[in-house]
């Protein structure tokens, strides 16, 4: 068995008015607010070319998630059968990477103002990718 | 500066006829083949509930990518201006997580047969997530 691990080094952190897990809506389209993505000085040159109006995918590290969870009741509903986490969007999963689609509202030096983002303040940012096609925002 | 690192532990590996980086098309819709996702025994219970026909997002660790790259010429075209990697889908980036949209063709114990997938044989798998809405496959 290959037991190699790969270290994620955050490229920045979410700055948000959301400070508690319970206050975070479950999906971005369920009322999530805007937030700032504050990049580290090292990663900031990677923002070159981004501008207001761009559609992005933000990958975060859900640092409060449980990494030993493999099955859940979807959306915490005990009436729904236990389901593998890979068939759900549960934050609890072996590698708790969050995936959020946002619009860029403003770019200021090494920060992006974006919405909607359901991540709490201090969430580490793993990566930022452009949506490839405005009409079909799939993740190829 | 917060220098915490988060270790990715692969939940499995890609098994594919693609064995060389140059043979891999640049995006899944540019002729990528099918592949097997072979989960580790530890992560396999997370597949419960997945079935043929499901649409998934596969997050991979692009283990051959350059992590110190922050700006590139998009698609390797030297006539295009240097652009921040977060404005491109370059595999070279600080945390080289690949994002691939696939359809499930077959589920066999701890393996999924999927297509299209442009990752080479042996690529570590970080996470598997369902597409939330068949009509609008956005990444909220």
Image: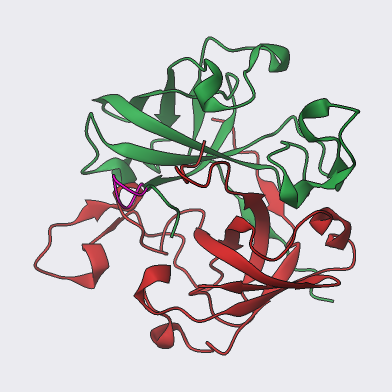
Chain colours: A green, B red
Q: Toward which corner of the image does residue B10 lie, by quadrant?
A: bottom right
Q: Nearer the viewer, residue A107 or A129?
A: A129
Q: Is residue A135 magenta?
A: yes
Position of the C terminus of chain A, as image quadrant, is bottom left
Q: Residue at x 22, y 34 (%)?
A: A51
Residue A87: x and y in percent read 73, 49
Depicted B30 relative to depicted B71: above or below: below
User: Residue B14 location in percent, x, y?
Assistant: 65, 75
Q: Locate residue B7 relative to residue A12 in the image: left or right.
A: right
Main secondary structure of the magenta stretch: loop
Quadrant of residue B123 in the image?
A: bottom right
Q: Is residue A27 magenta?
A: no
The answer to whether any part of residue A69 appears in the image is no
Above or below, B63 against A23 in this view is: below
- Name the foreground residue: A31 vs A117: A31
Q: Residue at x 58, y 34 (%)?
A: A124
Q: Is residue B15 left or right of residue B117?
A: right
Question: Residue B36 falls in which quadrant of the image?
Answer: bottom right
Q: Magenta stretch: give its range.
A: A131-136
């Amino acid at each position: 068995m290959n037991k190699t691990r790969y270290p994620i080094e955050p490229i920045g952190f979410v700055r948000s008015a959301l400070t508690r897990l319970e206050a975070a809506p479950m999906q971005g389209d369920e009322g999530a607010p805007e937030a700032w993505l504050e990049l580290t000085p090292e990663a900031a040159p990677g923002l070159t070319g981004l501008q207001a109006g761009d559609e992005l995918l933000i990958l975060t590290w859900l640092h409060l998630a449980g990494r030993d969870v493999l099955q859940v009741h979807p959306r915490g509903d005990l009436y729904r059968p236990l389901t593998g986490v890979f068939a759900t969007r549960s934050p609890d999963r072996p590698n708790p990477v969050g995936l959020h689609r946002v619009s860029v509202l403003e770019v200021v030096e090494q920060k992006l103002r974006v919405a909607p983002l359901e991540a709490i303040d201090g969430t580490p940012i793993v990566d930022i990718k452009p949506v490839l096609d405005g009409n079909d925002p799939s993740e190829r």
